[in-house]
Amino acid sequence: MRSDYMWFIMGTVVGIVILGLFWLIKRNNLSLTWYEWVIGIAGFALMLLTVQNFIGSFLEYEPRAAYMFLLVTGLPSLVLLGVAWQLAARRVKKA
């Protein structure tokens, strides 16, 4: 896998995810608070950084660094995304 394909695929996936997120918010008539947006964007950005560095490390034949980066930044990104999701879900459920 060449790195230019990786950027094309990541850009396509990011576009689909952002479009799906806005479509879901508009369809369900949801409103998110500013801190839910900030936590969600930080988690998503960290996830993109994780995927890019994971693939890049494998392309450079450094699998140990790839797995370490997956653990060190991938896990916190999942935690941030989970926190943003739970904040929004509990606020909507309470209302």
Image (cartoon, helix red, strand yellow):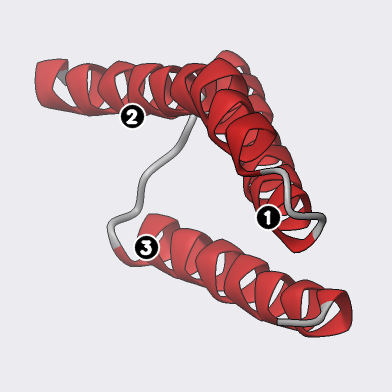
Is residue 45 positioned above or below 28 on the image? above
Could you say whether the residue bearing mark 1 is in a helix, strand or loop?
Answer: helix
Instruction: Give the residue drawn at x 53%, y 34%.
Output: 67
Front in this rendered view, residue 33 or 60: 60
Quarter-of-image position of residue 68: top right
> Disc 2 designates what residue?
85
- Compute the Cα span from label 2 to label 1: 31 Å
Rounded to the nearest whole Å, what is the CA distance between mark 3 and mark 2? Answer: 13 Å
Instruction: Say left or right for 81 vs 72.
Output: left
Comparing marks 1 and 3, which lies closer to the viewer? 1
The disc, 3 or 2, on the residue closer to the chain's N-terminal end is 3
Q: Position of residue 19 (x, y in %)?
A: 56, 72
Q: Residue furthest right?
A: 4
Front residue of this view, candidates 19 and 49: 49
Three-letter amino acid code at the position of disc 3 = Leu
- Element at label 2: helix
Q: Which mark is residue 95?
A: none
Eye-nearest disc, 2 or 1: 1
Q: Is residue 95 visible?
A: yes
Residue 58: mark in rendering? 1
The residue labelled by disc 3 is: 24
